[in-house]
Amino acid sequence: MAVFSGETLLCIRGERTVFADLDFRLESGGALVLVGPNGSGKSSLLRVMAGLLRAADGALSWDGEPVADDPEGHAGRLHYVGHLDAVKPVMSVFENLVFWARLRGGTAGAEDRVAQALATLGIGHLLDVPGRYLSAGQKRRVNLARVLAAPAPLWLLDEPTTALDRDAIQAIEATIAHHRQGGGMVVISTHADMDLPAADVLDLARFTRRPRSVFQGQEDEDMDDEDPDDADMPAREAG
């Protein structure tokens, strides 16, 4: 059984402590739901988990081994879906997904994996549509289809239900359930009511050291909503 954990994590953005002394533990088949007010660090924690943002203190571990010792190996075991989509506007949906499927899962069977991902999320009819013609909800589902088109045990999902209708949310719930049944893990930040049985909840407000004014809270929200250009692969670190 794989275990992904973090101990005494400290995140600083600019001169602000976003969260401190934060611990978590996630085992195979588990789900961790991040909650808390805007600016409490949900997006920042997901980026720390993905290796896109370096914690100022503390450590991440996979099966007891420091993630920092093998960042490329960690990148290969996860999918990160942030606020920004990774849909290239001049490429068709199929071309976008085949690119990611081959990059993350190899060329063998890539097209079949893409077709299955599109069918699972109910967007097979968009196969030949260029990215620039997709609605916000369609782009979101294409972005999530990348996760299905290449296997990875750890899914890090930041507000995956944004711009989706109830049917699409139910499809994502079923997909997450199937992933967990196969031993996969998921960490998810969401304001929607999602059906995630036996999920643990991590309230980031518990790890914020000081209260914020109304104006500072708005500034913190804007900071926490920033997203790196790379919507999946932790190819660089920020902070």
Image: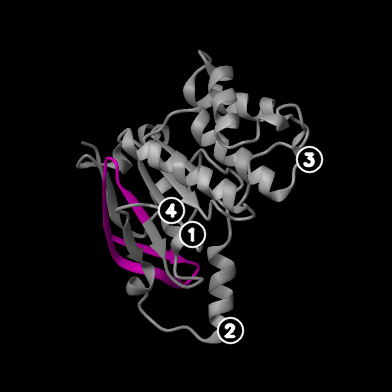
Residue type of the residue flagged with mark 1: Thr
Q: Amino acid at mark 4?
A: Ile
Question: What's the amino acid at mark 2?
Answer: Phe
Residue under numbered circle 1? 190
Question: Which secondary structure lies at badge 2?
Answer: helix
Residue 215: mark in rendering = 2
- Residue 37, position as x, y percentages in the image: 47, 73
Q: Position of residue 208 (x, y in %)?
A: 37, 74
Which one is earlier in the sequence, the residue at label 2 or at label 1?
A: 1
Label 1: which secondary element:
loop
In the figure, 152 relative to 3: above or below? Answer: above
Tag 1 near tag 3, CB within 8 Å: no
| Residue reaching furthest to the front | 167
Residue 51 shows up from this direction? no
Image: magenta residue range: 7-32
State which mark lies toward you, 2 or 1: 1
- The Cα atoms of the two marked residues, 4 and 2, are separated by 27 Å
Nearest the camera: 133 or 217?
133
Membership of 203 in magenta stretch: no
Q: Nearer the viewer, mark 3 or mark 2?
A: 3
**Cβ atoms at labels 1 and 4 below 8 Å apart:** yes
Question: Looking at the image, is mark 4 or mark 2 earlier in the sequence?
Answer: 4
Q: Is residue 145 left or right of residue 188?
A: right
Residue 18 belongs to magenta span? yes
Residue 118's spot in the image, x, y percent?
A: 60, 31
User: Alpha-carbon distance for marks 3 and 2?
Assistant: 36 Å
Q: For mark 3, what is the residue?
A: 132
Residue beneath disc 4 = 188
| Quarter that holds the N terminus | top left
Q: Is residue 211 above or below residue 149?
A: below
